[in-house]
Each structure stands twice: as C-alpha cells, then as structure tokens.
C-alpha cells in the first residue's frame, strides 16, 4: 500500500505517515496508531501482537 493510500484510508496527513515510516516521528500517539490500523483495516490488537512489544520497558509516571 502506498503512503498516499494509507494516509487517505487512515484520515491522516501524508506527511505524518511518511514521518513515521522514515523514522522521523519516534513517538506517534495512540490516536495516530489507531488511525493507521483503521487505514490497514486491522484491529489494534493485531498491530501489537508481535514479539517486539513483549519486552518493552515503559517509564510511566
């Protein structure tokens, strides 16, 4: 899927999606992640169902 198509499907600016994909945006909001999931037509649970998220250490204050 192209960046343009994803941004349209997700209701996000193309520059926002491009920044995330190119690593310029290091901390996208949950709202943005939810919109990207909607753009891909996947549930949020599927997005986070990956080993990369298993050992994250969050510094929540």
Image: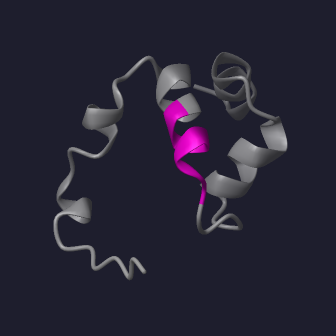
Q: Residue at x 37, y 22 (%)?
A: 42
Residue stretch in magenta: 28-34
Residue furthest to the front: 61
Q: Residue at x 61, y 41 (%)?
A: 32
Q: Position of residue 40 (x, y in %)?
A: 48, 23
Measured along the vertical axis of the image, is residue 26 above or below residue 48? below
What type of secondary structure mainly makes up the magenta span?
helix
Q: Position of residue 37 (x, y in %)?
A: 47, 30
On the rendered image, what quadrant is the N terminus found in?
top right
Q: Position of residue 35 (x, y in %)?
A: 57, 30
The quarter of the picture where residue 10 lies is top right
In the image, residue 42 lies in the stretch drawn in magenta = no
Q: Nearer the viewer, residue 21 or 48?
A: 48
Q: Nearer the viewer, residue 10 or 29?
A: 29
Is 50 situated left or right of 35 in this image?
Answer: left
Is 25 situated left or right of 48 in this image?
Answer: right
Measured along the vertical axis of the image, is residue 31 above or below residue 57? above
Q: How many marks?
A: 0
Q: Residue at x 68, y 64 (%)?
A: 25
The quarter of the picture where residue 8 lies is top right
Is 5 situated left or right of 48 in this image?
Answer: right
Measured along the vertical axis of the image, is residue 2 above or below residue 57? above
Measured along the vertical axis of the image, is residue 3 above or below residue 11? below
Q: How is the image coloured?
A: one colour
Q: Position of residue 26 (x, y in %)?
A: 61, 69
Q: Residue at x 42, y 80 (%)?
A: 61
């Amino acid at each position: 899927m192209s960046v343009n198509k994803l941004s349209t499907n997700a209701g996000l600016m193309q520059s926002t999606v491009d920044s995330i994909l190119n690593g310029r945006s290091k901390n996208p909001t949950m709202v943005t992640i939810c919109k990207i999931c909607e753009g891909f037509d996947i549930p949020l649970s599927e997005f986070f169902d990956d080993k990369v998220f298993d050992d994250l250490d969050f510094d929540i204050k």
